[in-house]
Image (cartoon, grey):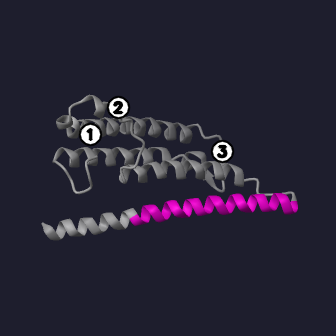
């Protein structure tokens, strides 16, 4: 059992590193592309016609993927009014409830995003960017919301078992 736990922990850390590396590459690509566009405009009064739409998609990917990373690290935006209204002994249960609620909201958003991507694919009018259809570029919506739903659900499960060494929240 301990060996399995250790293997799962190593795999989880590896996936975390891969996720962070992918996010860093996204940001590096965005910055490089934007600087390249600026240089081409200033130096040659030209640029790549595909760069601006690609940058918009990269911003979406970076923002939503960044939100998934923030959810994993439990550094997402929270509204902390309710914890001030309940007694301290109920705060751990409130955290479980809020994580479960956030998981359900993200699951609903995942479902809506799947419908959105499906409709994009069904009614695609040949819109492509660098050989990718618009529905393919929009896959980040269901992927990110599903990942956030899983992470909120996992946090609710962890918190329901009691305090962890990570801290109170």
**Crowding at mark 3 (Cα within 10 Å: few <14, some 14-19, many 20+):** few
Image side of residue 2 versus residue 131, left or right: left
Residue 119 sits above or below residue 66 on the image: above
* Identity of the residue drawn at 65% across and 52% down: 55
* Identity of the residue drawn at 56% across and 49% down: 137
The Cα–Cα distance between marks 3 and 2, rounded to whole angstroms, is: 48 Å
CB contact under 8 Å: marks 2 and 1: no
Report helix, strand or loop for mark 3: loop
Question: Is residue 83 inside the magenta stretch?
Answer: no
Residue 94 place in picture, x, y as percent? 24, 35
The quadrant of the rendering that contains the N terminus is bottom left
Image side of residue 37 versus residue 120, left or right: right
**Residue at the spot of label 3:** 126
Image side of residue 106 versus residue 167, left or right: right
Residue 116 place in picture, x, y as percent? 50, 37
**Crowding at mark 1 (Cα within 10 Å: few <14, some 14-19, many 20+):** some
The Cα–Cα distance between marks 2 and 1, rounded to whole angstroms, is: 12 Å
**Residue at the spot of label 1:** 95
* Identity of the residue drawn at 71% across and 51% down: 52
Q: Earlier in the sequence, mark 3 or mark 2?
A: 2
Question: Is residue 26 inside the magenta stretch?
Answer: yes
Query: Which dot marks residue 81?
Result: 2
Residue 83 sits above or below residue 152 on the image: above
Q: Which stretch did the figure color magenta?
A: 17-44
Report helix, strand or loop for mark 2: loop
The Cα–Cα distance between marks 3 and 1, rounded to whole angstroms, is: 46 Å
Residue 126 or 15: which is nearer the viewer? 15
Instruction: State how many labels appear.
Output: 3
């Amino acid at each position: 059992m301990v060996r399995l736990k250790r293997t799962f922990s190593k795999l989880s850390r590896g996936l975390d590193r891969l996720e962070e590396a992918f996010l860093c590459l996204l940001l590096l690509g965005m910055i490089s592309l934007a600087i390249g566009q600026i240089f081409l405009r200033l130096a040659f009064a030209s640029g790549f016609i595909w760069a601006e739409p690609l940058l918009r998609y990269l911003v979406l990917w970076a923002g939503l993927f960044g939100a998934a990373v923030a959810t994993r690290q439990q550094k997402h935006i929270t509204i902390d009014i309710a914890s001030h209204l309940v007694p301290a002994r109920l705060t751990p249960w409130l955290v479980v409830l809020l994580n479960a609620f956030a998981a359900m909201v993200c699951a609903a958003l995942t479902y809506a995003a799947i419908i959105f991507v499906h409709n994009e694919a069904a009614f695609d009018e040949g819109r492509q960017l660098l050989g990718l259809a618009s529905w393919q570029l929009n896959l980040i919506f269901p992927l990110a919301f599903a990942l956030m739903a899983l992470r909120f659900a996992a946090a609710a499960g962890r918190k329901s078992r009691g305090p962890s060494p990570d801290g109170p929240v």
